[in-house]
Image (cartoon, helix red, strand yellow):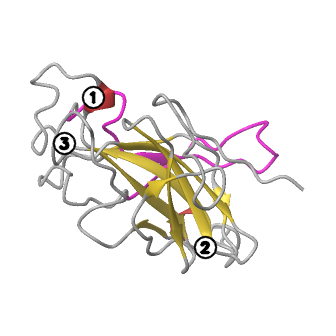
């Protein structure tokens, strides 16, 4: 199914390894990527999404995979307008693997999609009024266990948002700065990786 772009429309399908990745299970397991307001209303059409960075273990011990969610063609006619993927409506959402660090049976894994709101994290495009372009998120924990999520935008700046509840809810994204009140970090719509150092 192609509902935005053929390489982003799809299910999350997994295999497991018992030998550190040397061999993998023949069986596959599908886990839900919950829809939101920009998803196709047809439940048989998978979400448009991609995980760009490594997963992250939260302070509460959940595995979090931040992802870009692109809008369905039914929600945003960007493709019919011949706009590039960078101009399509996009938001930042999160897959949370609730029990993957303790559950050995892949049929019992619980995966939830956050935030539980109509929309994910949004940053308005400077070129299409009312359209969000927020992509390729990276998450890390701050020293007080709040989570910070950094994302690329079309504004020429990195944006970030904070979560105080282990990634369930987030505040409003704003420009990332070199220091409080300082200059914003310029970014020409390129990936925004964030790594924690010792």
- Across and down, in percent, residue 191 comes to 55, 34
Q: Earlier in the sequence, mark 2 or mark 3?
A: 3
- Across and down, in percent, residue 142 comes to 70, 68
Over which residues does the magenta segment extend? 3-32
**Is residue 177 among what the camera can see?**
yes
How crowded is the residue under tag 1: few (<14 C-alpha within 10 Å), some, or many (20+)? some
Disc number lying in front (2 or 3): 3
- Across and down, in percent, residue 76 comes to 13, 40
**Residue occupying the point 27% across, 28% down:** 5
How crowded is the residue under tag 2: few (<14 C-alpha within 10 Å), some, or many (20+)? some
Q: Are marks 2 and 3 in contact (CB under 8 Å)?
A: no
| CA distance for labels 1 and 2 | 31 Å
**Residue extending furthest toward the top:** 82
| CA distance for labels 1 and 3 | 9 Å
Give the residue at mark 3. Answer: 72
**Residue extending furthest toward the right:** 198
Quadrant including the N terminus: top left
Give the residue at mark 1. Answer: 5
How crowded is the residue under tag 3: few (<14 C-alpha within 10 Å), some, or many (20+)? many
Residue 30 vs residue 182, the one in the foreground: 182
Q: Are marks 1 and 2 in contact (CB under 8 Å)?
A: no
* Residue 25 left/right relative to 9: right
**Residue occupying the point 16% across, 30% down:** 78
Give the residue at mark 2. Answer: 99
Per the image, is 69 magenta? no
Residue 82 vs residue 127, the one in the foreground: 127
Secondary structure type for disc 1: loop
Q: Earlier in the sequence, mark 1 or mark 3?
A: 1
């Amino acid at each position: 199914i192609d509902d935005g772009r053929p390489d982003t429309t799809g299910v999350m399908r997994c295999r497991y390894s018992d030998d550190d990745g040397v061999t993998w299970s023949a069986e596959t397991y599908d886990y839900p990527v919950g829809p939101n307001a920009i998803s196709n209303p047809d439940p048989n059409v998978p979400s448009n999404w991609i995980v760009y960075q490594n997963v992250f273990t939260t302070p509460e011990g959940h595995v979090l995979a931040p992802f870009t969610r692109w809008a369905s063609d039914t929600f945003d006619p960007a493709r019919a307008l011949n706009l590039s993927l960078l101009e399509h409506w996009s938001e930042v959402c999160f897959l949370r693997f609730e029990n993957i660090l303790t559950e050995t049976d892949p049929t019992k894994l619980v995966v939830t999609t956050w935030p539980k709101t109509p929309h994910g994290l949004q940053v308005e495009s400077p070129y299409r009024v009312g359209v969000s372009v927020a992509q390729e998120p990276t998450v890390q924990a701050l020293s007080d266990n709040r989570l910070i999520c950094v994302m690329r935008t079309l504004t020429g700046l990195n944006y970030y948002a904070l979560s105080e509840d282990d990634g369930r809810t987030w505040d409003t994204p704003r420009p990332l700065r070199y220091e409080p009140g300082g200059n914003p970090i310029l970014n020409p719509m390129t990936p925004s990786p964030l790594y924690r150092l010792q």
